[in-house]
Amino acid sequence: MKRFKEQIIILNLIIKKPTSLASLIIVVCFVVVGLTAPLIVPYSEDAWGLTYNVEKRFLPPSLEHPFGTDALGRDMLSRVLLGSSFSLVIAAGVIGLSLIIGIPVGVAAGYHGGRIGTILMRITDMFLAFPPLLLAIVFAATLGRGLLNLIIALAISWWPWYARLVYVQTNTVKNMPYIDSAKIAGLSSFKIMTKHVIPNALTPTLVQAALDTGSAILEAAGLSFIGVGVKPPTPEWGLLVSEGWQSINYAWWIAFFPGLAILITVVGFNLFSDALRESADPRIRRTILMRLGIKQ
Amino acid sequence: MKNHSILRVEDLSIDYIVLGGSLKAVRNVSFEIYEGEVVCLVGESGSGKSTVGLAIAGALPENAIIRSGRIIFMGKNLLEAETRNKKVNNIMIVFQDPAATLNPLFKVGEVISDVIKTHLQIKEREKIKEKALEMFRMVELPDPTRIYNSYPHELSGGMLQRVVIAIALSTNPRMLIADEPTTMLDVTLQAQIIDLLLSLKRKLGLSMLFITHNLGVASEIADRIIVMYGGELIEEANSSELINNPLHPYTRGLMECIPRTHIKYSKLKHIPGTIPDLANPLKGCIFSDRCSEVMDVCRVVKPPIKEYSRNHKVACHLYMEEKQ
Amino acid sequence: MSRLVEINNLRKYFPIRSGLFGKIVGHVKAVDGITFSVGQSEVVSLVGESGSGKTTIAKCLLLLERPTSGEILFDGYNITEARGKEYRDYRRSVQAVFQNPFLSLDPRMNVHDIISEPVKNHMKLSRKELYEYVSKLLEMVGLDQSFLEKFPHELSGGQAQRVAIARAISLNPKLVILDEPTSALDVSIQAQILNLLAELKEKMNLSYLLITHDLSIVRYISDRVLVIYLGKIMEEAPTEKIFKEPLHPYTQTLLTSVPDPFAKDVREKVILRGEPPSPTNPPKACRFHTRCPHVMDVCREEEPPEIQFGEKHRTYCWLHVKK
């Protein structure tokens, strides 16, 4: 328990501030729903888009279909719920893939420096020179529609940010006196890198990566919305909005609910990342404590 | 000395709110500084010496709470709301790291000009610059015009500390608080800065509160030394009296810890244990858990600070009994 | 006393690069021709202010920097070229304690892992043996087993420095380099650490190379002192001699600059004017001439020769040439 004292205190701080608490609840709900949606959706076949039901087209929200039905008579609640699973998979895929590319590049460039380091970082800079969304659109369009292609396209625009972050962190850690201590202890370069440099350099990057979930969901939805993301009938939120867009005048609910889902999730993640940053930074933490008037 | 008191601190207590509780950083501290006098607050880390300095300068961090006390400067309580909101340019503070106090994006000349303009209400540019150069000359900076046009990173640590002192003095303050101003400097530069502060004191009749962890530095600059430990004031005396006749076991211990340059000896004395826990300060004497002469009464009753002899006060049960 | 480490004419220049292609535009001459030795179970102090090159010398000795020229002899071989067994032997024999324990200990490791890391790397011990060995080391530095599971941020400065010392002595080294080991500590804690170091030296027959700017701790612990300024030796002498008969004006200034509450009346203070020059462009001839209170014409023109004063006392100063 002692090891997690700091974490427990941070959690305590988050719970005490209403917006932070709300964001925490949203994030937890999103993850739980995302993991269980395939099992809990009321109309499983509708959710996966395997059905076509003419009688049920464009039904407004009702008890039977709380989010209404779409142009093909599918239950929107089921589709939006399952959409969270796709968002979760996409976000995890994009961030995971970006880390897999970004970490080795950043560590290699940061720890070894020299010519290889310079070349690696110049390549990273080239990617960073393009607006990320534009880069993702170009690659998504080139690769064609599909879940995996969407993840790859987003990761291509995403990894340089992590590479840069890891590079800076590695560079800082590399020059810490405890690295000198490790050299004096006689550890090999490899051991120093794996035991000291990487663990110390990665923590901030991994925290950042977890907090980027919101942005990943938003960008994926953006690409699907403009038609270079996943293929229909995948219940991806961006695609759902795009499908509902055409009938917005007479069936507002089709675009509205997936849009709302995107909004809540992204705002939730962003607020949560702010809350975490506030609570973890000792300087800002003080002011929160003050504002809350915590006196013991 | 028949001087007037310029600053009186009465029963000052300050807490810091931190993760999971509060630190009672300063507890019931009272002392006085007379006009033209240099008083040194001496203590180790966690003694509360810097907190006292910051409280007087009105520069406490946001998580500090003043629990009790008054700080009376030239007849006004600085802690009262109306005085607090007014800019007090009669007290200036100089910190340990001059590079951190100066904005790296501005030339030091611009910084001092700004201070002169706002505090002294001088409008003409030439007059401001003239005053700035005069201040630089006063702190014995070589080539003031070049310094005026330099950025902080172009100057060395010793020069920057002089610049910061010049800026502080440019508002014609009545009192200067110096918080470890020589700690980051090499010994030869430290000697220069101490020399400078002493000559400024003579020239300007400046009162000074000098905060340091180094008893050696304190003995060189102070008229009077106040020793703090664990947030409390434990001994106060004239500089030479305190050095030659320390009373409190902590002060004595501290004195014996200092390796000396002019005699050789085989084993250093040290004070066992670690600095006190400020979240739950001891009930009795704050030093009782490390004191080698501890008595039963020390663990239960906090000794008040009492006059032991003329100009020498101490907070210790050892000396209470002697007098009774 | 046999010699343990010999440093011959050590130089370390750091290139100053500038521009797009990193063209070398000059050198910081951090260490510029330094010769000295450390004997078996001897404590030698390197005293100097910032920019004197004292830390660079330590880094060269610890193989953290490669010297530009000169040699460092240990056990008869040049350590900058040591490979294989010789290299491992040297690594084992020379350890270090740095100024700030909170920076020199990995914040993610607990005390047990910190101390056992060098041991695991050099010796084959079972887990139980290792645990006992580490506990014994902790005891030697005055800490008990309850510290094994703690992380550096849970320790006080003095406790953390004790852990760093335990790690440094874990391999039974011959030489420990102490780089400002007490500058970050409070006075009362500084005395504890100095006493501990003195005690360990006796117990383990250690040699120390103490690097410090603080002359007051030098007298307590060291046998011999080297005073350096801008990468060059100014004076070398047995500790007592440095304090009693300092010959070089720089040594004299350093001695009187240390604020000592008990020496106030004993000595006359020499206050230097001006700032130390930059090691990028050090003064020609005698390096100290720009600040020296006794400067003469010859000091600006020619480098002073080495002058011996009795046994083991040497200085580089024109003042003493005439005699």
Image: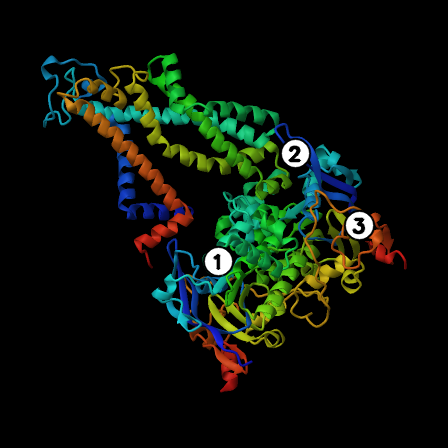
Q: Which residue is mark 1?
A: B122
Q: Secondary structure at mark 1?
A: loop
Dot 1 amino acid type = Ile
Left of A292 or right of it: where is C36? right
Q: Determine which quarter of the picture holds residue A250.
A: top left
Residue located at (28% from left, 36% from top): A28
Q: How many marks?
A: 3
Q: Determine which quarter of the picture holds residue B56.
A: bottom left
> Is there any visible trace of residue B182 in the rendered image?
no
Q: Secondary structure at mark 3?
A: loop
CB under 8 Å between callouts 3 and 2?
no
Q: CA distance from mark 3 to mark 1?
A: 48 Å
Q: Which residue is mark 3?
A: C286
Mark 2: few/some/many CA within 10 Å (<14, 14-19, 20+): few
Q: Nearer the viewer, residue B247 or A274?
A: A274
Residue B162 has which mark? Answer: none
Q: Which residue is mark 2?
A: C17
Left of C314 or right of it: where is C157? left
Residue B172: x and y, percent?
Answer: 51, 64
Q: CA distance from mark 1 to mark 2?
A: 45 Å
